[in-house]
Each structure stands twice: as C-alpha cells, then as structure tokens.
Amino acid sequence: MYPDLPVGVFRCDGNGRIVEANGSLADLLGERSPARLLQRAGHLVRDLIVDREDRRRLLKGLRESGGLRDFDCRMYRRDGSTVRVTISARVMRNSSGGIEGTLGTVADITGRVETGLALERAEADFRSLFENAVDGIYRTSGDGRLMAANRALAKICGYDSPDELLDAMNDPVSDSGRAPYVDPARRNEFHAIMNRDGIVSDFISEIRQRDGESVWIRENARAVRGRDGHLLHYEGHVEDITARRRLEESRQLRAQAAVSGISDALLICDNSGSAIFVNRAFETMLGHDQTSLARMGG
C-alpha cells in the first residue's frame, strides 16, 4: 500500500480496525513492517492515539464531517514513546451511503513542533533581554517612526514606559516626534553617517528629556536590510553617559584651575594645531585669550 510515499498511509474498515498500512507508517510508529503494526493490540487506529480526548475528537470529526485535515495529536510507538503527528482522513462510503471504512495519512511533525518551540523560547529570551537590558534599545522605520523601544530607553528619555515614549515620538502634531537632540544639527549628522556607511558608532550627543532636563548619550545603530538590499528598519543601542561626562568635565575644570594659576605660560593644542587651552600666564604674555587664539589657529 503506497510503499514509496514518505508519509504514513492507513486504511480502516467500518469498525475503525486497521486493515492496511504502508511501510512509512510502520517506520514512524517503530514497527519493523506493516504486518507487525497490524498485529498490535486492538488493531484500532484510535488505540494508537495517546490522549483520550484526542481520540474522541478524531472520531467525532470523522462521524460528523466525513473527514478532517491536519489533526494534531500524539501517537504511541512500539517502545512506548510517543511521536507528534498530524492525521488527515476521510470516510469512505458504499453506494447505499453506509460507512465502508476510512482512508488516511499520518505525517511526523515532531521536528516542526520542536523547531517552533525552540523559536518561541528564543523569542522569549530575546524579549526578556530586550525588556530588561540596562541600556536603551530601539527600532525605527526607514522614515524615522519609532517602532519599538525598551524600558531603559524610556527612562533615559524621561518617560515612565516604552508606550509613553512611542506615543510621544510618533505624535504627528508634537515636535517631540523628532529625535530630541539639544543641537538639531546632530540629527542631520547622524542620518548623514547612516546613509553613507549603514552604521553609526559611538555617536555622542546631548538630548532633551521629557521634563526639559538634558542628558548625554552614546549611540550605536545600524541599518537592517533584506536579502534584496531593501531597507527593513534601523536598530540602535543607547547608553546614558551623563554621569561619566560630568565627571570628565569636573576633572577638566579642576585641572584647568590647577594650571591657570601657575606662573609659567602653558599652551595645549589638538592634533590640528588649534589651541584648546591656555592659562592666564600665556594670555598675559601674548595678550590673547583662548577664544581669540582658537580663531587665529583656524
């Protein structure tokens, strides 16, 4: 009976007794041959189904509808283990309308179910990581609409929840629908780098929180594209570096205060040769302050 089909095939008589089965069904249920399968106790297809409620639903479906498709259940194997399958079957009737038997197929979906469960676990793990991450995480559409954000990003931006942040950022009326950079030019710089490179790394900016306070952030983002190169969305990671930034500024101020009062002239330049710091002795010696020296260097 259908020896070359990769799925199990069976035929039952009018009493539900299995009278034919192919080799694929025998293999699936752990039997060495179809004949050994037919010898299993009861010879009834329902006795091979693990769950009693599934047996009842199977028989009810056949009786009331004359057939069913992709009926999900577990079946017993010879060694007592179980296998996840789908059964599709239809009732065969004689010329007078009486039930002559049932013809059906059985497909092993264990791998499919396990893959689905693994995906569900992976999605749950990712969701937990996303929601509980210390740093902010977001996803935006190609036109800049905020699609997803975690609780950490909402907190960085001064909102009580991700939903509040999404509502504010996607509000077509409010100006908050644009990235809240204190310096508006930073938004354009961010997009220029993204459009050129497809990735933005260590992008440091000052942003405005919901209550008007400002914080410093470090942002990393990338463009996510489909196989055809079409832009799907952007994904980004935001770190609040306000405390670190203010500590660095405090150290710089203390260092400047320490060297400003020394009697020797002191000049510090960047790699381009522009003055980034001069002390009072240097200003007195040349008659120029740091601002005018920077203009001269430029």
Image: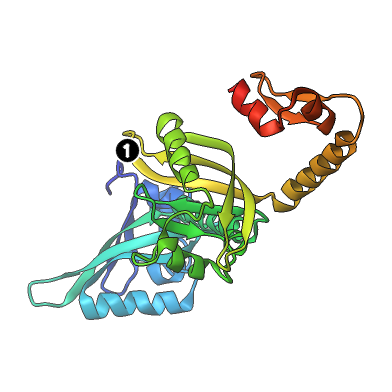
Determine which quarter of the picture holds residue 61. Answer: bottom left
Query: Relative to residue 236, is residue 198 drawn left or right?
Result: left
- Tell me if I can see residue 231 in this picture: yes
**Relative to 115, does residue 202 appear above or below in the rendering?**
above
- Quadrant (top left/top right/bottom left/bottom right) for the C terminus: top right
The residue drawn where x is 48% and y is 40% is 190
Give percent across and percent down for residue 238: 59, 49
Most distant residue in the left direction: 95
Give percent across and percent down for residue 256: 83, 38
The residue under label 1 is which amino acid type?
His
The residue drawn where x is 83% and y is 25% is 266
Q: How is the image coloured?
A: rainbow
Give percent across and percent down for residue 212: 57, 65
Query: Relative to residue 17, is residue 158 drawn left or right?
Result: right
Front residue of 278 and 253: 278
Residue matched to label 1: 230
Front residue of 17 and 242: 242
The residue drawn where x is 80% and y is 40% is 252
- Tell me if I can see residue 44 in this picture: no
The residue drawn where x is 59% and y is 71% is 160
Q: Secondary structure at mark 1?
A: loop
**Relative to 37, does residue 98 appear above or below in the rendering?**
below
Q: How packed is label 1: few (under 14 Cα within 10 Å), some, or many (20 or more)? A: few
Give percent across and percent down for residue 97: 11, 77
Front residue of 217 and 262: 262
Query: Relative to residue 268, is residue 236 drawn left or right?
Result: left
Front residue of 128 and 133: 133
